Amino acid sequence: MPKAKANNIEIEYETFGNPTDKPLLLVTGLGGQMIVWDEEFIQLLENLGFYVIRFDNRDVGLSTKFEEAGTPNLMKEMMAFQAGEPIEAPYSLEDMADDAVGLLDFLHIEKAHICGRSMGGMIVQLITLRYPSRVLSLTSIMSTTGNPDLPQATPEAMQFLLTPVPTERNAYIDHSLKIGRLLYGSGFPYNEEKGRNLVERAYDRCYYPPGFGRQLLAIVTNGNRKQKLSSVKVPTLVIHGGDDPLVPVESGKDTAEAIPGSELIIIDGMGHSLPPETWGQISDAIAKNAAKA
């Protein structure tokens, strides 16, 4: 797959569809490689007239790694943060937003529809705030404003964030499937075979836990975006699972409340996941929101 030189790093990316169609940039979540955007879901978007771009964020997959920053002690950093002590991240979510816009520059795309999931939702919010002239429409999925007054993740989900992942392949796969089941939600059947296939591909493509920790610090240090989001003018769609244990549904409601004129879709039984049963509804909603641009 090709690499783009953007924002002083290299970004691994892949495109789908006709470059003359509506550009749609997909931004993934914490520690996730671009392959978490399932190609069957992308095909639905392609069928709706989008030219789809997915990519590996910095510090994950086949994009540039920040080895010189070292591996953070997440437990120590999170305890310091909760105690109100200042903590530092090797880079910011703003840097990651700049990476994404740099990729659009590399592809000679002046304006794009943008869609992010989880941390990717935070990144697309920041793209819209930092580069409003580059954004046609915004979709924020299972994400948040960073408002500290919102309900936090369940203890089980928080433990997932802070537990070191195994290094051995089979142990890593079992660990990841356990997390997948925990986060999936109660309303849809978890497809063990599909989940295992994705985790195996991710491990074999690039097993790199330190990037997860550094990205998490970028999230934690970004702060509260809610007031700034009131300036967003583009058509905005907010999608959230009613059963999300990692980023509770109140976070989606807060995002929609912050952005004037936004549409909120809450999918009952969906957790911190995108079950295949929801793909048709979500892709149609993205297209409907894009049509407002």
Image (cartoon, grey):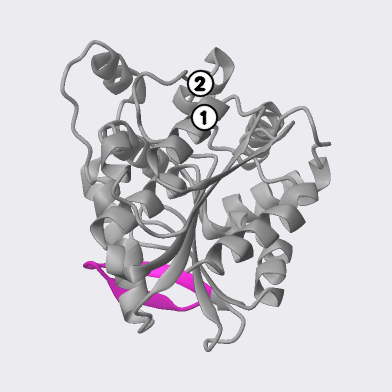
Q: Nearer the viewer, residue 100 or 167?
A: 100
| Residue furthest out toward the top | 83
Q: Which mark is residue 153?
A: 2
* Residue 247 left/right relative to 210: right
- Residue 105 sits in which quadrant? bottom left
Q: Residues within 10 Å of mark 2 (few under 14, many from 20)?
A: some
Give the x, y percent position of residue 217.
30, 34
Q: What amino acid is labelled 1 in the image?
A: Val
Q: Nearer the viewer, residue 207 or 54?
A: 54
Which of the marked residues, 2 or 1, is nearer the chain's N terminus?
Answer: 2
Q: Which mark is residue 133?
A: none
In three-dimensional space, the C-alpha distance between marks 2 and 1, rounded to whole angstroms, equals: 6 Å
- Residue at 16% in and 23% down: 86
Q: What amino acid is labelled 2 in the image?
A: Ala
| Residue furthest out toward the front | 261
- Residue 181 sits in which quadrant? top right
- Residue at 56% in and 59% down: 205
Give the x, y percent position of residue 143.
48, 39
- Residue at 67% in and 60% down: 283
Residue 197 can be seen in this image: no
Q: Exactly how many numbered labels are in the figure?
A: 2
Residue 209 can be seen in this image: yes
Give the x, y percent position of residue 231.
28, 49
Q: Are marks 2 and 1 in contact (CB under 8 Å)?
A: yes
Q: Residues within 10 Å of mark 1 (few under 14, many from 20)?
A: many
Give the x, y percent position of residue 201.
65, 55
In the image, which residues are magenta? 1-14
The residue to which callout 1 is attached is 247
Which secondary structure lies at badge 1? loop
- Residue 58 sits in which quadrant? bottom left
Q: Is residue 178 above or below residue 34?
A: above
Question: Predominant secondary structure in magenta?
Answer: strand
